[in-house]
Image: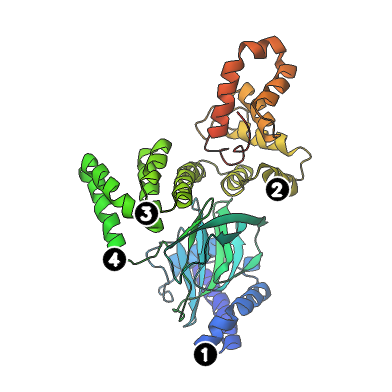
Amino acid sequence: MSVDAAVHRVEAFFRRLGDDIAATLGDSREAVYANLEAVALAKLDEHNPSAHISHADLVDYVLGADELCKQADLDARFAEPPLSLYNGGHFDISALTWLDGTTSIHQHAFCGAFHVLAGSSIHSRYRFQAWAPPEPKQRAIAGDLALIDIEVLRPGDTRVIRRGDTLIHSLFHMIRPSVTIVIRTITDEPGAEVQYDYRWPGLAHDPFQKHAPTTRKLQYLRMLRVLDAEAFQGHLARVLPEADLYLAYTLVSEQIQVSADVDEAQRLSQLCTRLPAAERALVHRAAHNDLLSRTLIDLRRKLHAPPHRFLLALLLNVFDRGELLRLVSRETGCTDAVAQVVEWVAEISGNTDRYPNLIGMDFNATALDLLACMFAGLDAEASLQRLAIRYGEDDVAEHRDALRALFRALKQCALFHAVFADLRD
């Protein structure tokens, strides 16, 4: 097919889809806000873009088109890149292409639906319970975040986008590229909800907040971090005791992303004396998890095989070992989920003939055997007893201290810190 034909086909398809939605909704802004979720879901299923449009078609369309409709995100702040395909006045149809990016756990201030055009993604849904009733449009909220479910989305799958905390979710894209068609409201709603991002184990914050004093504090402290590290530390220690939850979390998390010092997160969070003790502990845990999660997110750029990205998605989003193993069994059909996980770790660390070391971490045969024990839920002593059956009691006794140290290292490793948190050293 020629480029001109592809341009015409893409334009015609999304014009039909957009015009169908517009005709169903009518011109009323209120009708769009009230009904777009149901209408977008139905029309995406009816028109099924994945059956008619490919990623290659979108490439030909962009590179061959003389004009595009109004672009909702011209600077590509979200997706790699985005592409608006239809502007309906109060709603937009876009194709979001993803290579190595992943979304945070978040909610939306808009509504609509999304449809997988190409690739495959892990879709995780959560619930959040605030510790106290939040104030309207509060910048940060303390609470408990819990995973509801995880599913694998494939081409043709369509899901609703609900505004507010009725949909808290994240997407981890397994195949390069993954392409999603999104239909969403684009004009401001009166009383629209805050679009919170969530951090484990339960901190909601508004990444789009516009509180001028807070924004300038952050900007000046970032400047000082570059200009004068000693002065920065002094000013940071002066600001933190008066910081609210939003500012405290942002400063502590940013600082340990720079220093990679977990102990510093503990020290800095204790300086936040305006906050109750439980919120100081939450700031520490959220900032610590940010640092470890960043390691996992960075690894996805090195892993391209869907099973390996599936493992990373689970390690990033599932904080319960039993649930992780259940999902591995469900999605792969394997009879031994522990063995499957260990096999994937062996592959990405270069311990098979199939792949080189992709992640820069070395897991020798002993580490992989110990890892299998830990995924089976065994604590340090029980793991050593199982290793003694394999290697002999004398050999394990001789290396007991080193094996216990390896157990602690695996427990603290960024890959496994969440799923091994309950295992005794």
- Image mark for residue 327: 2
Q: Residues within 10 Å of mark 1 (few under 14, many from 20)?
A: few
Q: Residues within 10 Å of mark 2 (few under 14, many from 20)?
A: some
User: What amino acid type is highlighted by mark number 4?
Assistant: Ala
Of labels 4 and 2, earlier in sequence is: 4
Whole-percent x, y for residue 181 in the image: 56, 67
Q: Give the Cα distance between marks 4 and 2.
A: 44 Å
Whole-percent x, y for residue 300 in the image: 52, 44
Q: Give the Cα distance between marks 1 and 2.
A: 44 Å
Quadrant holding the C terminus: top right
Of labels 1 and 2, earlier in sequence is: 1
Of labels 3 and 4, earlier in sequence is: 4
Q: Give the Cα distance between marks 1 and 4.
A: 37 Å
- Image mark for residue 27: 1
Q: Are marks 1 and 2 in contact (CB under 8 Å)?
A: no
Of labels 1 and 4, earlier in sequence is: 1
Q: Residues within 10 Å of mark 3 (few under 14, many from 20)?
A: some
Q: Give the Cα distance between marks 3 and 1.
A: 49 Å
Q: Are marks 1 and 4 in contact (CB under 8 Å)?
A: no
> Quick one: 201 or 160, which is closer to the camera?
201
Q: Residues within 10 Å of mark 4 (few under 14, many from 20)?
A: few
Q: Which element is circle 3 on?
A: loop
Q: Which mark lies nearer to you, 1 or 4?
A: 4
> Quick one: 412 or 269, which is closer to the camera?
269
User: What amino acid type is highlighted by mark number 1?
Assistant: Asp
Q: Are marks 3 and 1 in contact (CB under 8 Å)?
A: no
Q: Is residue 46 left or right of residue 129?
A: right
245 up-or-down from 4: above or below: above
- Residue of label 3: 274
Q: Is residue 289 left or right of residue 324?
A: left
